[in-house]
Image: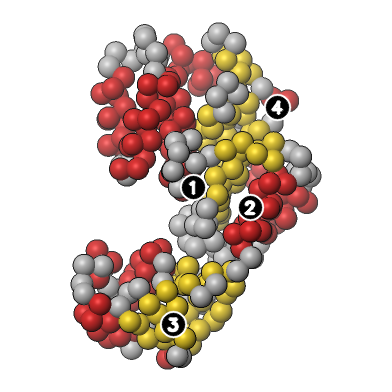
Amino acid sequence: MQTMTTMENAWNRVSELSQNCFDDLVPVKDIRFEGIDNMFIGEERHPVRTTAQRQIATRLGVPYSYLSKCDADLQTENLGYWLAREKNDEFFVRFDGTEVRALFTPRYQPVDNIRVMERLEQMGFGPDMKIQLALDAEFFSLSIPDHEKTFVVGNDDKLTPGITVCNSEVGRAALSIAAFVLRLVCTNGLIAKTAVSASYRHISAKVMEVFPETFQQVAGELDVQQTRFRLSMESQVENPSNTIHSFNRQFQLADPEIQAVDWAYPQEMENPATMFNVVNTYTKASQAPGLNAEASHRLGRVGGAILGMVK
């Protein structure tokens, strides 16, 4: 779930999650599997996390949906067969302690969350700055509100625009920068749909160099969000429940995300309902207890996409 905190606390949490992490280029000839749950490198056994299992299956051309239903012996047979036909001599493997957290080709150059934090610090975002954070072992989303640009809509409802940076060290998402809007009364965070956004595949060492320019480009579109929010408050919704269900299907929300939306619905919906209430249902859902960081970020993006539809 997303929480309000400080840059210093974000630093501490990122450091804590990364303290046992390391990478290695592993010769393919040294790898064998015992089912999909365990990978041996030489004689060392390494438990394989679910994300890495999916990456291994994809890399070897075995559908994960099929592989996960096979018994361990058949998994071992399938993986061994296709591993022997792998074209790369090495895999780039990311570890957390003894566990395999991700597996890629040698061409992949991941951006660590620590490097993102270092770049933000270089840009002047100090330890006491208030930010919104969603973070776990697989996904990082950090939003920086610009309180000097706070604006008001409706009945003194204060909204603060800013910038969101998201990243995944294990390949769940590319490093990206997007516009962000924080609703101060309840700290709902919306990741806005803008014409300017940036997403970088983890195969370029130059990603971090363009951060300042991209921040400026995205910030240049934040004024557009004021108009969209005001229009959303004027757009009435006759059947908000059906509208929510329709958006859930349109954005293909997973069950935990739908449950989070159901949790947020009674907290944000008013009578008469408007698109403003619908948007805030999704941004509120990002704060649902127990939601992982990626799902939390996704719900903020869904809220932004819905706002972008308002005309």
Q: Amino acid at mark 3?
A: Arg
Front position in the image: 58 or 210: 58
Q: Give the mark, 4 or 3, whose residue is nearer the N terminus.
A: 3
Q: Give the mark, 3 or 1, whose residue is nearer the N terminus.
A: 3
Marks 3 and 1, Cα distance to the nearest angstrom? 29 Å
How many other residues sit within 10 Å of disc 1, few (<14), some (14-19) or many (≥20)?
Answer: many
Residue holding disc 3: 45
Q: Give the mark, 4 or 1, whose residue is nearer the N terminus.
A: 4
Q: Is residue 167 left or right of residue 130?
A: left
Q: Amino acid at mark 2?
A: Arg
Who's the residue at 54% across and 61% down the image?
A: 169
Who's the residue at 72% across and 46% down the image?
A: 8
Query: Is there CB contact under 8 Å for labels 4 and 1?
Result: no
Residue holding disc 2: 13
Marks 4 and 2, Cα distance to the nearest angstrom? 24 Å
Query: Is there CB contact under 8 Å for labels 4 and 2?
Result: no
Q: Is residue 232 left or right of residue 19?
A: left
Mark 4: secondary structure: helix
Front position in the image: 216 or 185: 185
Residue 187 appears anywhere in the view: yes
Who's the residue at 31% across and 19% down the image?
A: 240
Residue 220 appears anywhere in the view: no
Residue holding disc 1: 293
Q: Give the mark, 4 or 2, whose residue is nearer the N terminus.
A: 2
* Image-quadrant location for residue 17: bottom right
